[in-house]
Amino acid sequence: QVHLVQSGPEVKKPGASVKVSCKASGYSFDSAGISWVRQAPGQGLEWVGWVSSYNDNRKYSPKFQARVTLTADTSSSTAYMELRNLRSDDTGFYFCARIQRGSGTILDYWGQGTQVTVSS
Amino acid sequence: EIVLTQSPSTLSLSPGEGVTLSCRASQSVTSRYLAWYQQRPGQAPRLLIYGASNRATGVPDRFRGSGSGTDFTLTITRLEPEDFAVYYCQQSWTFGQGTKVEIK
């Protein structure tokens, strides 16, 4: 079955960068894109962006556009999210999720989440 | 930009009761891209409904999605203990703020 396994928790200082990984298994990685979603403490879900696993397409939320890079490595079936110039309000859980094939935006399988803490 | 407004913010109910959650869009949206997710405490979200009314794999039939245009609903016909969670609607890359269903 489909599994997305994310890297472990991170603690970073303001201004630093973080790179979170999301390893996929149980399906053909290059058949579906990966999206990233943030959840600040006690808050709702916020879309970060998505990346195609089979071509070079990607799209970012305007809120994160200047600081985020999403990539997908088909050789290792792993997607990555790098967020730069971290601020304290970047603290939260970051989830990767598979984009349901043919749907465009429906997220049918999710990773367990990676907690990122930004603190001086 | 489309805004999704979910109501109510919180519901206090007992197991066995039924509930209907609302998701209203600021403008007419395509039902094909309307989804509902469940998030239990400490867990990742889980897809429940896609295309406004289609249950995702493994989702019990007590969960029912409906609606079109600007108004969508998620109905749980009979709450089980594991259904007490936060529910989010999504349209394209916008999420509603969530409705928490808590145990009375």
Image (cartoon, rainbow, N blue to C red):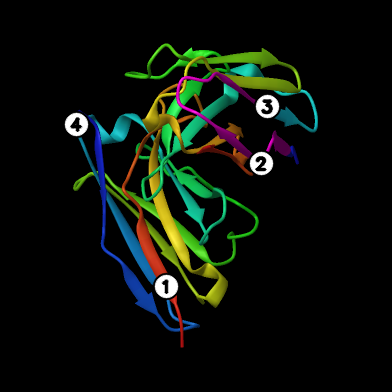
The amino acid beneath tag 4 is: Gly
Picture layout, residue B73 above or below residue A3: above
Dot 4: within a 10 Å radius of its alpha carbon, few (fewer than 14), some, or many (20 or more) residues? few
Q: Is residue A14 magenta?
A: no
Quarter of the N terminus of chain B within the rendering: top right
Q: Chain of mark 3?
A: B
A3 and A115: which is toward the camera: A115
Residue A66 spot, x, y in % from top left: 59, 65
Secondary structure mostly seen in magenta is: strand
Q: Is residue A15 above or below residue A64?
A: below
Asked whether A58 or B85 is in front, the reply is B85
Give x and y (percent) for residue A30: 30, 34
Dot label at residue A117: 1
* SS of the residue under disc 1: strand
Give the residue at mark 2. B9
Numbered disc in front, either 2 or 4? 2
Nearer to us in this view, B86 or A100: B86
The residue lying at 52 percent from left, 68 percent from top is A90
Secondary element type, mark 3: strand
Please state which amino acid type lies under the numbered disc 1.
Thr
Secondary structure at numbered mark 2: loop
- What type is the residue that disc 2 sits on? Ser
> Between marks 4 and 1, how big is the CA–CA gap?
30 Å
Q: Which mark is residue A29?
A: none
For residue A26, which numbered disc appears in the image?
4
Q: CA distance from mark 2 to mark 3?
A: 10 Å
Give the residue number, with chain letter if any, for mark 3. B22
Q: Which residues are magenta?
A: B4-21
Co-location on one chain, circles 4 and 3: no
- Are labels 2 and 3 on one chain? yes
